[in-house]
Image (cartoon, rainbow, N blue to C red):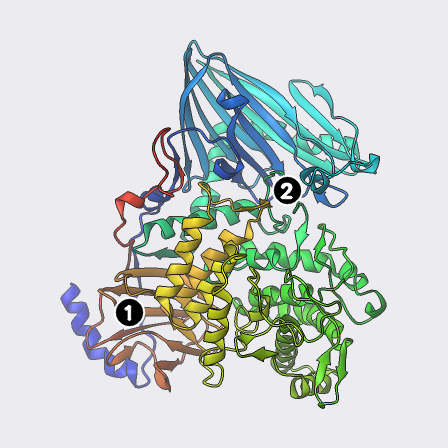
């Protein structure tokens, strides 16, 4: 049968190459998802003791962590909810603590990615406790199942979190009366326990839980958290969720919970020879899906978990933006909707933040709560950069109504704030009269012509003009945007490359890639522009040449820029340097407090190595290191709303498949050697790229030579020594990290 199919394909190829109709060759998906993901589960051969090594579950709003307390003699089930705030800052909820009858001797645990649940075992001198826990994918309930054997018995104790100013608490500053709240109040409603934490100026959060005995040492705990401006409403929310969960029962909850995750995982697939990096990637997909969902809160720096931190709000000068990159090429766009909803719902506050310019502008300061309220300060870049994320959500799906109704009006306002700061200088150029490059020390205030501001203003004007053209809008500001692009001052640079601003050279180690934003992620200065390649290379090398202050996300940016330059070995080196030096056992990265964005953005950099789509073309394997002889990905997403699959064997790309979801023009650089054939009409576009004719819903296969290869998607061979890399080794054994 296979030989007959190849003969038929050989007869049809001339028609396909010279105007024939699309032939759906079909990609065989051979991924056994449960069997594949099991090699990436986090495995603990001893029980974790802290946030950075804990197991975690979540559904985009409610979450839980599992780690030990009491010097290893109890198990904390730490509950979290991402929108519970006091004076716009996140606060801890509290812990349900499992206290065995005996002394804990050993323990183990596994975070099952396929089913999104943690399972474990505790050995005591009285017997054994087995447990299973998950945060239901849809319902606002955490579930913890316990089975005891021997002489063991499980007792639960509630330990509430401290409802006070978390930044002051972290920095050990004196707490004023307004920083604190009254203690929580315990109550019961039937067989449901309740702890209500009042919060100023009114309302609070309520934790409700119910323990259901199932016989033979088995019991199930259902727990939920309510949050409202009135005590009764907060209690009702939590109690209702617990009652409904208990009535449904464990089996029903587990089945529906798993069903959501089993649909989620196959949305996008990658497999690479670096098994540790592959594991890290899938853990980030799990983490992001646990941290945010459509209709639920946007991600701050922690997700639905909590740890002592000075960063208990939304940070708009890098953290928020980096967190919302992996879902794009990763083809999990639904996870980016919460960021768009944050901006939509905060439109009035964002305008108010612009103060004297609020009639036509919008902006936001460095931090805010979920209400987006935070006046623009020295940093002008925060909202324009976030609008780039919003625009990327559009570019990967090409929903023109989204562009017209939601993005275009707010992008105009964000760019208008910049336009109000412009002034023509003696050189005839337009200059941004104030600004601040995030986190670079010893800047003047104001700091005119920062490269981050010039980058975002250029990108914003270009995007507004392109949007008007696409949407056929005759906007009265078109001449102003055109004039700004024509007269805006060039990017400040010196012998070392791009500067911080016109007055500030890049002269000290700096973790932020703010001065390189035009390169990444805006891609308006690239090495594909001959006049800019040397500047791009020089600027990256100079940034990385001073490592003292580099942070985790510094390596993320360097990896992405290296992939952009086609330097796959360097891209992989930077990502592995991040994993070697910065990533903790559960990948929950910390810089003083949790910084969820860094590992998530690293997953996006891996996507950039496999598939990029900035500018006018899609690029397959643009930044793959030479050592990766076999690579495969399926249904990664590209700008223009394309799904792309490809396979590489023995260091050579075997085939590429691209499917159009919106009927947009398709220019593809497939990384194929020799004579390239295609199952739809195509024509060369130069530099190894081809223009394909694809209607909405159509797909094409490109391959080298005369015979189409087998179009199979399957994992590459794993390195057994690096399977289940994350978690904790047994006591006394060295960590592979």
Observer-nearest of 159 and 654: 159
Q: Quadrant of residue 341?
A: bottom right
Q: What is the number of the mark on residue 308?
A: none
Q: Position of residue 356 (x, y in %)?
A: 85, 68
**Which residue occupies 59% across, 66% down?**
514
**Which residue occupies 28% across, 43% down?**
721
Q: Hey, which residue is sitting farthest left in the picture?
A: 3
Q: Position of residue 198 (x, y in %)?
A: 77, 31
Q: Secondary structure at mark 1?
A: strand
The relative height of residue 112 versus residue 235 in the rendered view (above or below) is: below
State the CA–CA distance, disc 1 to disc 2.
48 Å
Within 10 Å of the Cα at label 2, are there few (<14), some (14-19), or many (20+) other Cα atoms? many
Look at the image and tell me in which quarter the C terminus lies.
top left
Q: Position of residue 139 (x, y in %)?
A: 58, 38
Residue 332 can be seen, yes or no:
no
Look at the image and tell me in which quarter the N terminus lies.
bottom left
Q: Hey, which residue is sitting farthest top in the picture?
A: 151
Which mark is nearer the camera, 1 or 2?
Answer: 2
The relative height of residue 399 versus residue 305 in the rendered view (above or below) is: below
Observer-nearest of 139 and 104: 104
**In this rendering, would 185 be left or right of 108?**
right
Residue 257 can be seen, yes or no:
yes
Observer-nearest of 266 and 373: 373
The relative height of residue 593 versus residue 448 in the rendered view (above or below) is: above
Give the labeled residue for mark 2.
309
Q: Secondary structure at mark 2?
A: loop
**First in residue order: circle 1 vs circle 2:** 2
Give the labeled residue for mark 1.
655
**In this rendering, would 128 be left or right of 303?**
left
């Amino acid at each position: 049968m296979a030989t007959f199919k190849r003969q038929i394909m050989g007869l049809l190829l001339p028609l396909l190459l010279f105007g024939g109709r699309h032939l759906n060759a079909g990609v065989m998906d051979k991924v056994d998802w449960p069997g594949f993901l099991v090699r990436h589960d986090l495995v603990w051969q001893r029980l974790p003791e802290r946030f950075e090594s804990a197991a975690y579950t979540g559904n985009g709003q409610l979450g839980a962590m599992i780690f030990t307390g009491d010097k290893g003699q109890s198990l904390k089930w730490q509950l979290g909810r991402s929108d519970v705030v006091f004076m716009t800052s996140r606060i801890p909820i509290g812990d349900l603590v499992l206290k065995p009858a005996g002394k804990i001797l050993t323990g183990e645990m596994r975070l099952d990615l396929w089913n999104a649940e943690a399972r474990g075992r505790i050995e005591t001198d009285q017997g054994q406790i087995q447990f299973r826990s998950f945060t239901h994918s849809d319902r606002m309930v955490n579930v913890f199942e316990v089975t005891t054997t021997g002489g063991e018995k499980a007792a639960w104790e509630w330990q509430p979190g401290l409802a006070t100013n978390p930044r002051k608490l972290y920095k050990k500053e004196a707490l004023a009366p307004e920083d604190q709240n009254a203690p929580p109040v315990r109550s019961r409603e039937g067989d449901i326990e309740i702890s209500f934490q009042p919060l100023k100026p009114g309302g609070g959060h309520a934790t409700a839980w119910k323990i259901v005995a199932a016989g033979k040492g088995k019991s199930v705990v259902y727990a939920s958290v309510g949050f409202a401006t009135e005590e009764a409403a907060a209690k009702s929310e939590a109690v209702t969720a617990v009652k409904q969960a208990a009535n449904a029962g464990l089996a029903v909850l587990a089945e529906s919970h798993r069903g959501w995750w089993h649909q989620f995982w196959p949305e996008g697939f990658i497999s690479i020879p670096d098994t540790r990096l592959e594991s890290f990637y899938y853990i980030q997909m799990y983490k992001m899906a646990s941290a945010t969902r459509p209709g639920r809160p946007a991600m701050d720096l922690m997700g639905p978990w909590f740890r002592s931190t000075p960063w208990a709000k939304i940070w708009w000068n890098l953290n928020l933006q980096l967190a919302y990159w992996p879902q794009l090429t990763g083809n999990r766009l639904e996870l980016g909707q919460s960021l768009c909803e944050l901006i939509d719902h905060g439109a009035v506050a964002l305008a108010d933040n612009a103060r004297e310019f609020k009639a036509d502008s919008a902006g936001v300061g460095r931090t805010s709560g979920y209400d987006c309220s935070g006046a623009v300060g020295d940093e002008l870049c925060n909202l324009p950069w976030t609008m780039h994320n919003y625009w990327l959500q559009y570019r990967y799906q090409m929903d023109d109504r989204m562009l017209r109704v939601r993005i275009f009006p707010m992008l105009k306002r964000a760019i208008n704030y910049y336009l109000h700061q412009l002034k023509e200088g003696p050189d005839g150029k337009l200059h941004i009269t104030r600004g601040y490059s995030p986190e670079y020390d010893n800047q003047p205030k104001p700091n005119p012509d920062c490269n981050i501001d010039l980058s975002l203003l250029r990108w914003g004007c270009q995007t507004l003009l392109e949007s008007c053209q696409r949407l056929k809008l005759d906007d009265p500001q078109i001449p102003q945007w055109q004039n700004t692009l024509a007269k805006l001052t060039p990017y400040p640079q010196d012998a070392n490359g791009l500067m911080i601003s016109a007055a500030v050279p890049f002269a000290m180690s700096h973790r932020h890639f703010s001065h390189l934003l035009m390169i990444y992620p805006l891609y308006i200065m690239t090495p594909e522009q001959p006049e800019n390649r040397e500047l791009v290379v020089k600027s990256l090398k100079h940034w990385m040449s001073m490592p003292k202050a580099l942070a985790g996300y510094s390596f993320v940016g360097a990896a992405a820029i290296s992939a952009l330059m086609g330097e796959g070995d360097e891209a992989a080196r930077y990502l592995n340097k991040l994993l070697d030096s910065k990533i903790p056992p559960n990948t929950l990265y910390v810089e003083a407090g949790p910084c969820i964005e860094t590992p998530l953005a690293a997953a996006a950099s891996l996507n950039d190595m496999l598939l990029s789509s900035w500018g006018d073309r899609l690029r397959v394997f643009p930044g793959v290191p030479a050592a990766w002889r076999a690579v495969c990905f399926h249904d990664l997403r590209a700008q223009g709303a394309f799904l792309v699959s490809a396979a590489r064997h023995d260091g050579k790309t075997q085939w590429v498949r691209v499917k159009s979801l919106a009927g947009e023009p398709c220019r593809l650089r497939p990384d194929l050697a020799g004579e390239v054939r295609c199952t739809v009409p195509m024509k060369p576009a130069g530099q190894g790229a081809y223009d394909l004719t694809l209607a909405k819903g159509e797909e094409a296969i490109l391959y080298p030579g005369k015979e189409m290869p087998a179009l199979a998607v399957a994992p590459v061979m794993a390195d057994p020594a690096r399977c289940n890399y994350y978690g904790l080794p047994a006591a006394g054994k060295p960590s592979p990290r």
